[in-house]
Image: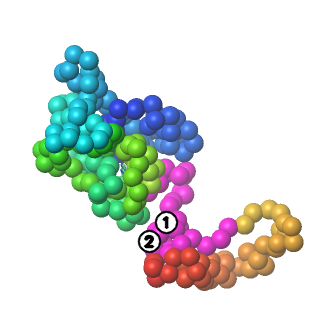
Amino acid sequence: MKYDVITLFPEIIEGYCSHSITKRGIESEIINVKTHNPREYSLDKHKRVDDTPYGGGDGMVLACQPIFDCYNSIEKKENFEFIMLTPQGERFNQNIAVELSKKEQIILLCGHYEGFDERIRLGLKPREISIGDYVLTGGELGALVLIDSISRNLENYLGKDKCACDDSFSEGLNGLLEYPHYTKPREYLGMKVPDVLLNGNHKEIEEYRKNESIKRTKQKRPDLL
Ligand code: ADE
């Protein structure tokens, strides 16, 4: 999977991607993350990328030219998706993460300041995605949320023969929340690991996990049932 991130703050994306599983995913070439800074495409003599809004109002608006030229400079694969991160977009979820994991390339456009010149939406026709009903200062956190959650669904990304199929919300759990996990010791501060997990009976363990998953979802997210 190739991710191309259009951002005025490439260090935010590069910083996150140089750690943990994302770093390993890049090293093993399962994913590739490239940043593109619109400032480098600005034709303004001071390399400005924004301007004051027509009609007045607070804040600055990202201008068309640097964004259009930056987007057009990116080489597109056949099966790509172009996404704009915005609080006005469709709400992101696990189903969309799985759907997007089947693409060859995802181009992510991060906003900043007051917003985008409307002609960026009209001219480039991105799919608009929001990561929740709150407003962030920029789209970078949203882009990283997408990169992380989409990549988990790629083959071998979590390690050889490991898969995200038992994650909360996943098809393997019928869209429910994941069951509880335990590790050593068997008892901690008087709290014991349930016996069923210690007896080695895989059928019983599977049944226990399924029931816990339903119980948890009923308690915490009844809307998912
Ligand atoms: N940019 C600002 N707020 C956002 C949100 N909620 N989701 C995605 N991108 C954003």
Residue under the point 46% across and 35% down: 12
Residue under the point 72% across and 66% down: 182
* Secondary structure at numbered mark 1: helix
Residue under the point 26% across and 54% down: 128
- The picture quadrant where one finds residue 32 is top left
Q: Are marks 2 and 1 in contact (CB under 8 Å)?
A: yes
- Is 151 drawn above or below residue 38 in the view shown? below
Residue where numbered disc 2 is placed: 171
CA gap, disc 2 and disc 1: 7 Å
What residue type is disc 2 on? Glu
What residue type is disc 1 on? Cys
- Residue 49: x, y in percent? 26, 29
- Is 216 drawn above or below residue 103 in the view shown? below
Q: Is mark 1 within 8 Å of ligand 1?
A: no
Query: Which of the two residues, 210 or 48, is positioned nearer the viewer here?
Result: 48
Residue stretch rendered in magenta on the structure = 152-181
Name the image quarter holding the N terminus. Answer: top left
Q: Residue furthest top?
A: 45
- The picture quadrant where one finds residue 190 is bottom right
Residue where numbered disc 1 is placed: 165
Predominant secondary structure, magenta span: loop
Q: Is residue 168 magenta?
A: yes
Q: Is residue 139 magenta?
A: no
